[in-house]
Image (tube, rainbow, N blue to C red):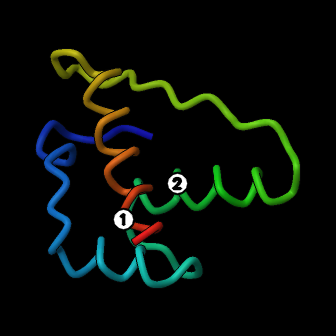
Amino acid sequence: MTITESGYDLDMNNVDIQHDISNSDKLRTVFGFIVHGLDARRRANRKPFTVMSCDNVQQNGEVTKKCILQFAKSLNN
């Protein structure tokens, strides 16, 4: 997946983000797909998949990690 730089601005109040936090079907955001996909593999006792950012964003790996962890933590609240 390719995300524009503005796509890494994870607004937890965004309606699509809120939808993906509340629903694991008909996901609307890339972070919803990634986090729910990782969770489904975990529940199925499967190994996780690699998430690698190839976007032209400074510190792209760290930015991706931050967004994924922020989204994942919101599922546990």
Query: In the picture shown, does residue 68 fall above or below 39?
Result: above
Q: Which quarter of the figure has residue 68? A: top left
Q: Residue at x 15, y 36 (%)?
A: 5
Tell me the residue that label 1 is attached to. Answer: 74
- The disc labelled 1 sits on which kind of residue? Ser
Q: Identify which residue, 56 or 11, lies in the foreground.
A: 11
Tell me, yes or no, whether the two marked residues, 1 and 2, touch with CB atoms within 8 Å: no
Label 2: element kind:
helix
- The disc labelled 2 sits on which kind of residue? Val
Give the left or right position of residue 6, taking residue 28 as reference: left
Horizontal and vertical percent for residue 65? Answer: 37, 32
Give the left or right position of residue 31, taking residue 42 as reference: left
Q: Residues within 10 Å of mark 2 (few under 14, many from 20)?
A: many
Tell me the residue that label 2 is attached to. Answer: 35
Query: In the picture shown, does residue 43 fall above or below 50?
Result: below
The N terminus, quarter of image = top left
Q: Residues within 10 Å of mark 1 (few under 14, many from 20)?
A: few
Q: Residue at x 42, y 75 (%)?
A: 20
Query: In the picture shown, does residue 20 fall above or below 29?
Result: below
Q: Residue at x 17, y 74 (%)?
A: 14
Label 1: element kind:
helix
Give the left or right position of residue 73, taking residue 56 as reference: right
Horizontal and vertical percent for residue 36? Answer: 58, 61
Query: In the picture shown, does residue 33 fall above or below 25?
Result: above
Q: Which mark is residue 3?
A: none
Q: CA distance from mark 1 to mark 2?
A: 11 Å
Horizontal and vertical percent for residue 67? Answer: 30, 44
The C terminus, quarter of image = bottom left
Horizontal and vertical percent for residue 73? Answer: 40, 57
Pointer 1 or 2: first along the chain = 2
